[in-house]
Amino acid sequence: MRLVLDTNVVVAALLWAGTPRRLLDRAIDEALTLYSSPALIDELAQTLHYQKFAQRIGQSGTTPGALMAQYSALVTLVSPTQVPRMIEHDVDDDQVLAAAIAANTDFIVTGDRKHLLPLGSYEGIAIITPAEALRRIEAQP
C-alpha cells in the first residue's frame, strides 16, 4: 500500500503514541510504503521547529533534526512536475495532493478536516484519516 502522510499526521506520529505512530510502525515493518516530496519535507522541518513542539521534543530526548532523519529514512521522495491549485487558503495542502499524484499513491492520510478531508478524494486517490488508513491496511490479507 502506498501513502502520502500530511504533515499534521507525521508530527503526531513522531511525537506521540497513537494511530499515526502505528502507521509509521507499519512503514518500518514494510507493510506499506510512504512517499513525500521536498516541499513536504521542508514543511515538516519548519513545523518541528515551532515553539509549541519544543517541550514535547525535549521530553522525548530527541531533536528536530533527529526526527527529520528518522522520517526521511522511511519515505521515498518524489518530485511533482505540477502542483495543482486546489486549496485556496493553504498552498501546503496543494503540495500534499501533488506528492500523492507523483507517487501514484493509494491514499492521502490527513487530519485536516478543514481543507483536505472534505475533498474525499483527488484524481482517484482517497483522502482519509489515520484511523481509516489503519483500518484499510489491517483489512488487507
Image: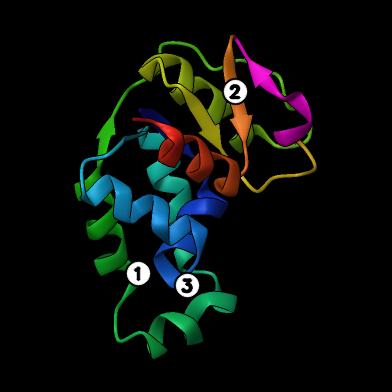
Gap between marks 3 and 1 measured at Cα: 14 Å
Query: Looking at the rendered structure, which numbered label has been put on residue 126?
Result: 2
The kind of residue tagged 3 is Trp
- What residue does disc 1 label? 64
- What residue does disc 3 label? 16
Queried whether the magenta region covers residue 138, the answer comes back as no
Q: Position of residue 80 (x, y in %)?
A: 40, 17
Whether 26 is drawn above or below 1: the answer is: below
The kind of residue tagged 1 is Pro
> Image quadrant for the N terminus?
top left
Residue at image point 22% right, 51% down? 28
State which tag comes first along the sequence, 3 or 1.
3
Q: Position of residue 124 (x, y in %)?
A: 58, 10
Q: Quadrant of residue 123?
A: top right
Q: Which residues are magenta?
A: 116-123
Residue at image point 56% right, 24% down? 97
Find numbered disc 3 in the image and state the secondary structure of the residue it sits on. Answer: loop
